[in-house]
Image: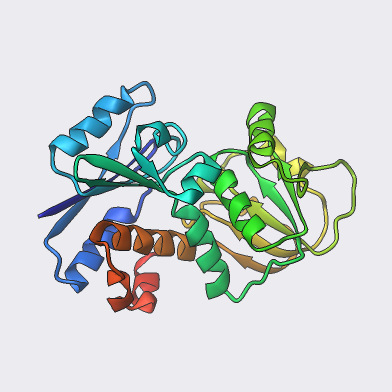
Amino acid sequence: MFKFHVIGNPINHSSSPMLFKYIFKQLDIDGSYTKKCIKLDSNLKSEIDFFQKKSATGINITMPFKSKLISYADILDNDSIQTGNVNCFHFKNKKIYGYNNDVYGFSKMLNHNTINLAGSNNIIIGSGSSASSIILSLLKQNVNNIFILSRNRKSTNQIMNNFKNNKIKKLPNDKKIENCNLINCTPITLLKNQNFDIINKIPKMEFTNIIDINYKIENNILNFSCENKINGKAMFIFQALKSLDIWFESNISNKLDYKQLDKLIC
């Protein structure tokens, strides 16, 4: 049996086990996929060693461990190196291969929704691992500017120093921004009945696209005027399919019907 897991904290909201259980059934794969909540003060090396000793083929990694676990990979793909975070491990030949599939997943989501961001301006809410991945994807799409809106100055400066690209800037005060998209890379839409001061710092304007990378939305906090609004369901599915191809070292995901996967994730 092939063994897979997803780890994070919190992890209860994850639909990954349900998605992969369906995928394994469709592809007639003898596999299991479970989720595990990792304590924030856990010995991460021990956690990774545990999965390897249990003969796991791979794991997916979600917040807040994407940047914390990158140092445990023996070999990294280019997107992981550029962003400084991983969301997929492949255990093979006693080595750990680390991948960032979020960059790919975000790009595929845009294509799936026929959204072209080339030449656009973009406000990114957040400055964590997910924001770093989205920023790399935006740079690959040749956007005009990327404005970071975050309460964490340290992580904002880290991103700017990491990429060293003059397209990446801190969000200016009271500046009108044309052809602008709003992209949420934080958990603020996953929480019910919460107030977030950062919302008050978003310019009052009409956005071209509002993109929330979360796929389980619990509030309407991003209730700004826009031409188009999408959530991260497609991104979630596409990054999962990329993990599947990595683990089985083939394009096995081509055998799946995306529409059926889309219906599965509510």
Residues 150 and 222: in front is 150
* Horizontal side of residue 159 vs 77, given as left or right: right
Judge whether 174 appears above or below 37 on screen.
below
Residues 138 and 192: in front is 138
Q: Name the residue rendered at 30%, 61% in the picture.
A: 244
Asked whether residue 192 appears in the rendered view, the answer is no
Q: Quadrant of the N terminus?
A: bottom left
Counting the numbered discs, the total is 0
Residue 101: x and y in percent read: 44, 54
Q: Name the residue rendered at 56%, 42% in the picture.
A: 193
Residue 57: x and y in percent read: 20, 49
Q: Quadrant of the C terminus?
A: bottom left
Asked whether residue 261 appears in the rendered view, the answer is yes
Q: Name the residue rendered at 13%, 39% in the picture.
A: 54
Residue 239: x and y in percent read: 41, 59
Judge whether 228 appears above or below 165 on screen.
below
* Displayed quadrant of residue 188: top right
